[in-house]
Image (cartoon, rainbow, N blue to C red):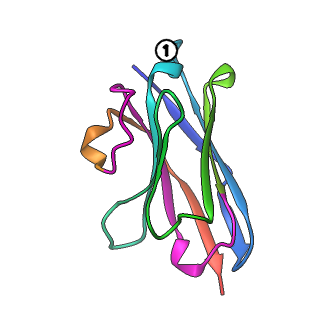
């Protein structure tokens, strides 16, 4: 079983930056696709970004140009660099793994494992 642990969340002013990290267990990390999702209170979980096993990426329209997803396979870690943060970005951010590593799916149901989430709060 895969374990995912997010870190790097916190409180930041609008216009600021944060970098989230997601550390994964296992020796086959490089073959997985990884995604970031977020969920605000009383709202549905929404797709943020994904990166597949050959580092093709996909972004939600709301974050394209501001957020960057990347991975370091030697460290079993995926990152989400968040710049120009807006209050609308406030949410719990979740890391997820898709064992079908060729995909960059926007659908949460396609991901097999999820982390516990890390809170990002952007003040106006």
Question: In the image, residue 66 lies at what x, y percent?
Answer: 62, 65
Q: Is 121 left or right of 39, judged from the image as shown? A: right
Q: Is residue 55 above or below residue 16?
A: above
User: Which corner quadrant of the image does residue 6 belong to?
Assistant: top right
Which residue reaches farthest bottom? 124
| Residue occupying the point 28% across, 49% down | 107
Q: How many marks?
A: 1
Question: In the image, residue 17 lies at what x, y percent?
Answer: 73, 65
Question: In the image, residue 19 lies at what x, y percent?
Answer: 70, 53
Residue 36 seen from this side: yes
Q: Is residue 118 above or below residue 53?
A: below
Seen from the viewer's position, the closer of residues 12 and 83 is: 83
User: Which corner quadrant of the image does residue 99 belong to?
Assistant: top left
Q: Is 99 left or right of 65, judged from the image as shown? A: left
Which element type, helix, strand or loop, lies under badge 1?
loop
| Residue occupying the point 48% across, 27% down | 53
Residue span colored magenta? 82-106
């Amino acid at each position: 079983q895969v374990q995912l642990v997010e870190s790097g969340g916190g409180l930041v002013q609008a216009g600021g930056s944060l970098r989230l990290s997601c550390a994964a267990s296992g020796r086959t990390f490089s073959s997985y696709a990884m995604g970031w999702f977020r969920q605000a209170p009383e709202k549905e979980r929404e797709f943020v970004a994904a990166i597949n096993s050959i580092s093709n990426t996909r972004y939600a329209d709301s974050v394209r140009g501001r957020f960057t997803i990347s991975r370091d396979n030697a460290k079993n870690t995926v990152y989400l660099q968040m710049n120009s943060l807006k209050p609308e970005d406030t949410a719990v951010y979740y890391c997820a793994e898709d064992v079908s590593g060729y995909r960059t799916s926007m659908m949460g149901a396609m991901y097999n494992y999820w982390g516990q989430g890390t809170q990002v709060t952007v003040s106006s």
